[in-house]
Image (cartoon, helix red, strand yellow):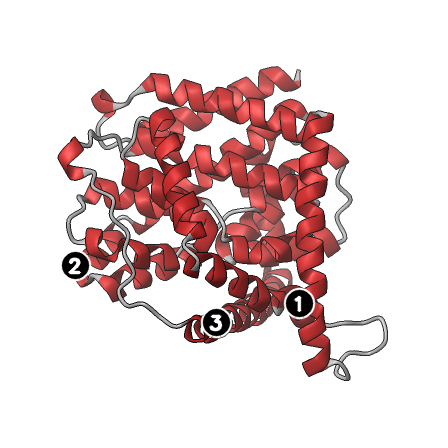
Amino acid sequence: MKYGIAIIGILVVLLLAWLASSNRKEIKYKPIITMIVIQIVFSVILLNTEYGSIIIQGISAFFNKLLEYASEGINFVFGGLANEGEAPFFLTVLLPIVFISVLIGILQYLRILPFLMKGIGWLLSKVNGMGTIESYNAVASLMVGQSEVFITLKKQLGLLSKQRMYTLCASAMSTVSMSIVAAYMTMLEPEYVVTALVLNLFGGFIIASIINPYEVKPEEDMLEIKDQRKQSFFEMLGEYILDGFKVAVIVGAMLIGFIALMAAINHVFELIFSISFQHLLGYLFAPVALLMGIPLSEAVSAGEIMATKLVTNEFVAMLDLSGGSQEFSSRTLGILSVFLVSFANFSSIGIITGAVKGLNAEQGNVVASFGLKLLYGATLVSILSGIIVSLVL
């Protein structure tokens, strides 16, 4: 039964992408089928094999160790702030982003990260049938973040077509930054976070190649990443420390605003309609939950989580999932967890548009023009990842 639902779900997602396609005649179906098979294979390996379990445990142990190191600095500065056994969310989940941002900066400074991004990007381009820049950008988005990645492509931005800009932005919205993966692992099971990272990488290519197909000529696909100015090591450290802290504060501020706003809206809806706004959205997203293989008995509650992620951000939804009153089966928890690990929400449209506009005003306007289509595609990527995982859980 679950396989039949999953197959129907995959076909529906591909159909929804096809309906929004800008050029259906240019769609290359062979790479799409290949990447779906790759997604299924990776899901089986990571979630259903001993080798996958070893990989997940290793990655989880690595990030747990990073969190331990981060806590040393946090405890030194904020040690007396928290009550015994009641450390605030900002200290335990968000502030470790500062330390992980520093590690990313060091890897970037030593040219290890650019080498990995270009190498993996080149390999991906052989599978997805897209340009080298598109493949590089997807890996770079995962490594350095959805807004920072455009800085590494500053020289190329003005030369890229609207079609290629869509694919770059879609990759940035469909993945998440490594700097906040550890934060996710404090709220979700590490195995689902890691699996989602892999699935979304390929899912972004699948949906973008349907919604936005095009051909890249060899002379248009030059990838040359250069730093604008060579920084000293300690100058770089200071920059990445501040960048990490800014991310932590910005996420914290967004959580305060979104959670407070959602509570207010829920209260107003309960007074007027005797139903919360989130519960109402749950009914709207219940068909999508069913499509992802979630049982009917859990579909509305799952729809609430999914809708919360779309209208607020993934952190708010993860907090609802991990600390909410809903009782989900382990399979539904896995599907929802994978769905939540991406930047597919309304606020990301503004973040990406602002990042590109700051580097190239004209291309920023181009990105703004397809903002909703960008969110539509990124949401389909999350749904597709959830469906793929439902096959193996």
Give x and y (percent) for residue 293. Answer: 62, 28
Q: Is residue 137 left or right of residue 174?
A: left
Give x and y (percent) for residue 125. Answer: 34, 31
Q: Is residue 330 left or right of residue 316?
A: right
Mark 2 or 1, nearer chain start:
1
Q: Are marks 2 and 3 in contact (CB under 8 Å)?
A: no
Distance between mark 2 and mark 1 Cα atoms: 40 Å
Quadrant position of the C terminus in the picture: top right
Q: Which residue is mark 2?
A: 362
Q: Is residue 131 left or right of residue 68?
A: left
Distance between mark 3 and mark 1 Cα atoms: 15 Å
Which amino acid is tagged 2? Glu
Mark 3 or 1, nearer chain start:
1
Q: Is residue 197 left or right of residue 190?
A: left
Give x and y (percent) for residue 256. Answer: 58, 71
Which amino acid is tagged 3? Leu
Q: Nearer the viewer, mark 2 or mark 3?
A: 3
Most foreground residue, 368 or 133: 133
Q: Which residue is mark 1?
A: 70
| Residue in view at x 67 percent, y 36 percent | 55
Q: Which residue is mark 3?
A: 237
Which amino acid is tagged 1? Ala
Q: Nearer the viewer, mark 2 or mark 1?
A: 1
Query: How many residues crowd mark 1 within 10 Å: few (<14), some (14–19), many (20+)?
Result: some
